[in-house]
Image (tube, coloured by chain):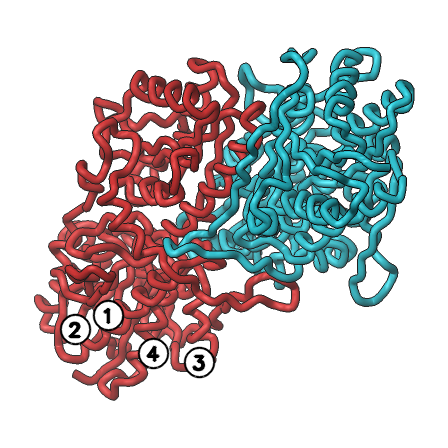
Chain colours: A cyan, B red
């Protein structure tokens, strides 16, 4: 099918989501069916507001530079469309924009909310007899999408978190007579994939982290205190990694944080504060000084130390989405399939957008030890290949990384302005 | 003078303090006057407790590996000795340990508290007619030692903070429609050197950080809100860097954090919580969503992206301390002297320990703009050369950095056990 294409990025940025965009763009440029490839400014919002830019007008070097540039260069958003009925107006507007710009290919890079949106756009297009190819491209540091072995973005955050814990762990090791314990909080709303990856840093008993807590195992303060005391007795220091999404036995978040922005636009509770909560518990109940770190968005944008495996796979899923699309495949997300071989090998597959949208992949219970305070060898074996290799970075004359920025010159709008539904 | 030497590390670790230790050790091994070079386990505590290890017994490859290993491989401490009168017992114990192990050279790597301790050990030795050479080696990420152009450890934290702000800034830029503002808190108890270094990340108007707050300028909530609103109006997003040591017009810390460990062993108030405080102010008063990050000890141990200039200079000051010592110099700290040349060149000098001990170098007011919310070109010119170059890291087969760890096999004690004074 001849027509234009649009690519959009959604949700939390990662160190390699731009690598996926680059894969989409460069592959689109190889296929004659695709006349122009537009970028949408800030995900689905850019489509709703008809804020599109022609990626063919960007400097090809800048496009190539996306492979080493963190965050979402097209712009991202957290705007969530609801059901086709509830968000009908928005969905119809999307198709209206597609029609007026002859967009026949829609590539959406994101997590399960984005796959849900993409799926529904495809369904409505079919209903309305508008020929449209919709392909999803996985992206989430949380690594919680099902039907794919892992998600682009995860390998880089895993590499960075493990390295950071290794380094900060040496601090606690050197200064245990003063700062005896440390809690480092990782992202991971529903699953412990990121926190668990920190376990790679522990090559020997004395290495940090000594304890890892993930949302998959209900958190018990009593067990936690026993764990901390035991490590403290053995090593004289304790380094703890905890996921932001820790819940107690009743399923309630253990965080202390409250406030007027306690929920994000998707209605998800904004987390944070686990580290501080645990620090206070350790100081009060164990009586040792405890520091804490919340590295926040730094962890998902650390392109200065990204995983080459991750970056290359991020490019690949973008590229494959286009190849499948031009062959007429629609309504699928490209997946990563780990081959059953002694050496790590990974190919791509396809999963229905609707399946991915309604699923959530947690860390299997057997990848967490019985005590619920560390990962097992199975999890190690799973994560290890994903952090291999480093993406070469370009350092400027000022000693700092040089990341690209696209010009994003918006094309002229043809429709009247639109107010989004929610 | 013939005899043994001891090297010790004190205070908060850095990405390059081991480089200084390596400089001391390797240089000591070149001089026949120095028979054995001991490491003290955990700074002055290791001397008080007669916990020494022979660095000549370590694998020379491990010693060389110190140059790419973060934190304090000898072990560090925050134990503070008071005046010669008040801490007499401790000071005498130190000399007793020195005598029994024929230690004639004492190299202390640390900040101004450590220079104070080293100075007093030297004074007491003289009083007691014990021939002892005492040399200080500067180390602090805070960069607040006087009589030296800058301090080893600072260049690396500056490089890392600027890079991290550049990366996290791209996150805010991509996702401003949801997460509109971000506050990143840096270390820096009394001076804004670290927060100010983040300014290097801002190569153009749109780059983060947009606002920087340092302890040198009394913090006013009203001015802060005006600043935030102005940036938000211009760019639609705001990235703020704030030093942990921010004080209001009355000199009071603006932090919210309280608790039973509110002060460290030196009696310094434990800071932290500035970012969360500012985040709450922004959300409440400006009405935009704000994230925050407290990267804590990660910032001072980020050897995976350390400054080569910093690492080389850290080695140099260690090496020069030994060269001066064997020539009979005592009671001095090695300083870094920036030459007055168009290209950055740095040599070493000497400053009296007593002078360094009682001083604190803040960021000059004229290096901060009039509004008190960003650095000026002078500060840029000062920091820029210090972040240049990258220290080659060794990556293991698991894709993570390989840092060395010393064996630290303690020599047999000859004295009875000792209880430290405070």
Total numbered labels placed on residues in the image? 4
Quadrant placement of the N terminus of chain A: top right
SS class, disc 3: helix
Q: Are marks 4 and 2 in contact (CB under 8 Å)?
A: no
Q: How far apart are labels 3 and 4 at the CA level?
A: 9 Å
Mark 2 or 3: in front is: 3
Measuring 21% from the left and 57% from the top, which residue is drawn there?
B115
Residues marked 2 and 1, same chain: yes
Quadrant placement of the C terminus of chain A: top right
Q: Quadrant of residue A347?
A: bottom right
Left or right, A149 with respect to B271, comes to right
Left or right, A169 with respect to A142, comes to left
Measuring 62% from the left and 32% from the top, which residue is drawn there?
A53
Q: Which residue is mark 4?
A: B26
Q: Are marks 1 and 4 in contact (CB under 8 Å)?
A: no
Mark 4 or 2: in front is: 4
Of callouts 2 and 1, the N-terminal one: 1
Q: Which residue is mark 1?
A: B106
Q: How far apart are labels 4 and 2 at the CA level?
A: 20 Å
| Chain letter for mark 2 | B
Q: Position of residue B340 (x, y in %)?
A: 15, 60
SS class, disc 1: strand
SS class, disc 2: loop
SS class, disc 4: helix
Q: Which residue is mark 3?
A: B60
Q: Are marks 2 and 1 in contact (CB under 8 Å)?
A: yes
Q: Is residue A225 visible?
A: no
Q: Which residue is mark 2?
A: B132
Please, is residue A31 above or below residue A422 in the view? below
Q: Position of residue A205 (x, y in %)?
A: 61, 61
Of callouts 1 and 3, the N-terminal one: 3
């Amino acid at each position: 099918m001849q027509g234009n294409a649009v690519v959009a990025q959604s949700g939390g940025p990662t160190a390699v989501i731009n690598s996926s965009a680059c894969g989409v763009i460069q592959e689109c440029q190889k296929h004659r069916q695709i006349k122009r490839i537009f970028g949408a400014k800030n995900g689905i919002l850019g489509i709703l507001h008809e804020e599109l830019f022609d990626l063919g007008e960007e400097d090809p070097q800048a496009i190539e530079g996306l492979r080493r540039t963190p965050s979402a260069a097209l712009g991202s958003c957290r705007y969530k469309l609801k059901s086709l009925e509830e968000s009908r107006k928005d969905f119809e507007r999307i198709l209206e924009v597609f029609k007026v710009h002859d967009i026949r290919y829609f590539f959406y890079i994101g997590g399960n909310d984005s796959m849900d949106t993409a799926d529904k756009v495809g369904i409505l297009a079919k209903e309305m007899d508008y020929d449209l190819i919709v392909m999803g491209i996985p992206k989430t540091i949380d690594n919680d999408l099902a039907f794919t072995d892992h998600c682009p973005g995860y390998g880089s955050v895993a590499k960075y978190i493990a390295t950071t814990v290794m380094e900060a762990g040496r601090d606690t090791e050197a200064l245990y007579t003063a700062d005896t314990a440390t809690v480092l909080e990782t992202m991971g709303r529903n699953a412990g994939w990121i926190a668990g990856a920190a376990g790679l840093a522990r090559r020997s008993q004395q290495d940090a982290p000594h304890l890892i807590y993930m949302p998959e195992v209900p958190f018990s303060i009593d067990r936690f205190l026993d764990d901390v005391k035991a490590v403290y007795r053995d090593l004289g220091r304790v380094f703890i990694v905890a996921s932001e999404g820790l819940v107690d036995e009743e399923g309630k978040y253990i965080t202390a944080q409250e406030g007027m922005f306690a929920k994000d636009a998707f209605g998800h509770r904004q987390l944070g504060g686990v580290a501080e909560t645990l620090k206070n518990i350790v100081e009060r109940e164990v009586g040792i000084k405890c520091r804490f770190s919340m590295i926040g968005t730094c962890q998902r944008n650390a392109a200065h130390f990204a995983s080459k495996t991750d970056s290359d796979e991020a490019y690949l899923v973008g590229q494959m989405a286009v190849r499948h699309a031009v062959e007429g495949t629609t309504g699928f997300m490209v997946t990563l399939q780990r081959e059953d071989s002694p050496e790590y090998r990974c190919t791509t597959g396809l999963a229905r957008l609707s399946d991915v949208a309604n699923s959530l992949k947690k860390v299997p219970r057997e990848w967490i030890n019985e005590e619920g305070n560390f990962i097992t060898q199975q999890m190690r074996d799973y994560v290890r290949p994903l952090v291999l290799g480093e993406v070469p970075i370009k350092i400027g004359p000022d000693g700092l990384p040089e990341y690209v920025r696209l010009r994003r010159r918006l094309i002229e709008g043809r429709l009247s302005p639109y107010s989004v539904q929610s």
